Amino acid sequence: MTPRLSMKSAFETFLTAACDRLGYSASIKSLLSLAALEIKVEIPIVRDNGELAIFSGYRVQHQSARGPCKGGLRYHPEVDIEEVRGLASLMTMKTALVNIPLGGGKGGIDCDPHKLSLRELETLTRKFVKRIHREIGPNSDIMAPDVGTDARVMGWIHSEYSAIYGHSPAAVTGKPLALGGSVGREKATGHGIGIVIKEYSARYGTPLKGATVAIQGFGNVGLHAARAVTELGMKVVAVSDSRSAVYRKGGVDIDALAKRKKERGLLCETNDHDALDPAHLLETECDYLIPAALGNVITAENAPHIAAPVIVEGANGPVTGEADRLLKERGIAIVPDILASAGGVIVSYFEWVQNLQREVWSLEQVDAQLANILGKAARDVFDHAGENSLDFRSAAFDIAVSRVKEALDATGF
């Protein structure tokens, strides 16, 4: 089984187990599994060298019973329909778990954004919108940044969609502030990880001050997660990206690493930091491990070597189904992605609300509301887990699946 298939397979495993615990029929399980709409388009562009290149674009709308579909758009060479299906399904559970009135969607284009010029990226993005614009929008499916995309890409989507339908800021979130973006959106996913860890510490009495953290991934999520846990008094001892990794026993210099990453594209060769094999970052001895890059990085092969007693999933689907089983057998706690990485979609929801209501919230408002919603979701998961002798992922899926089922019942399917 390929890693891309594994993410969807893992979701099916967790969904089936939740449906069995909740007493739902096989037909209900199938209804919760299947996507409502899947789109695939081919996108030809003329490269800067005059050559024609054709990319495949995908958008999956999984469930909209609880509200318009919401989910990221990723640019990555390994994007395919199976991966997008799995990610859209997870987003449905994520929005339901944190109890915001949205469904789940996801999209992607099978390109390497690092190998495309700015003009090529913009052309690709605008052509994608032209091909799917009838199926997206503020009341049906709202895109947001994901792996390989950012506020600038969301700005192009906003521009192209508005050229067709008139000024429509609520059609996409994660936009630049000048186009109706929200303060706090860029840091939201990483900041939310800090909120969830704080709730975990409060519930289970694990000290924050001096606790050690290793973070796989030093993009937007990993960087802001590092800053969030540092503010809690924790010590980030190791970080990695796809090509480099560093370790420092006394705690890494986050600002210095961010500067080196921006200037050189690598984390290594930073003063007073030891180079580390990126493949071994996940096996670092620490109190908390945060996989904050791509999915399926913790597998049956490396699960026996994970040293951290707590894994906080900052990425979507970083632990395969088999690895999840092995880690639970070892007594390792896993705070699941549908909880730990939900800060991004929560603040995207805030941006959507601000756009619809023509309001502008302060950072204090955004941070306070994020802490309220995500903190309650974490406490709900911990409560359900304790009351029913469940691991955190099972508890989270029980809550999310029951909420989606309740909405489907209310709409008559």
Image: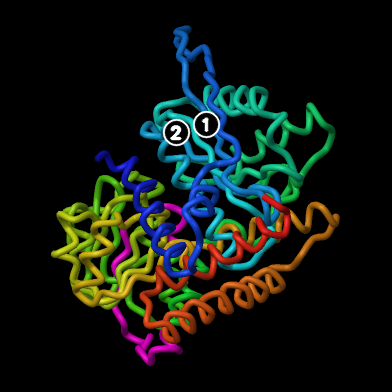
Q: Residue at x 56, y 66 (%)?
A: 402
Q: Amino acid at mark 2?
A: Ile
Q: Residue at x 61, y 48 (%)?
A: 63
Residue pointed to by mark 1: 58
Percent coordinates x, y for residue 250 in the rendering: 25, 77
Percent coordinates x, y for residue 376 in the rendering: 58, 79
Report helix, strand or loop for mark 1: strand
Q: Is residue 132 above or below residue 358?
A: above
Dots 1, 2 in contact, CB < 8 A = yes
Magenta includes 362?
no
Q: Which mark is residue 81?
A: 2
Percent coordinates x, y for residue 298 in the rendering: 25, 56
* Magenta residue span: 201-223
Graded by Cα atoms within 10 Å as few (under 14), some (14 to 19) or many (20 or more), the crowding at tag 1 reads many
Which circle's residue, 1 or 2, is located before the other in the chain? Answer: 1
Left or right of residue 364, residue 356 in this image: right
Graded by Cα atoms within 10 Å as few (under 14), some (14 to 19) or many (20 or more), the crowding at tag 2 reads many
Q: Amino acid at mark 1?
A: Tyr
Q: Is residue 290 above or below residue 286?
A: above
Percent coordinates x, y for residue 273 in the rendering: 22, 63
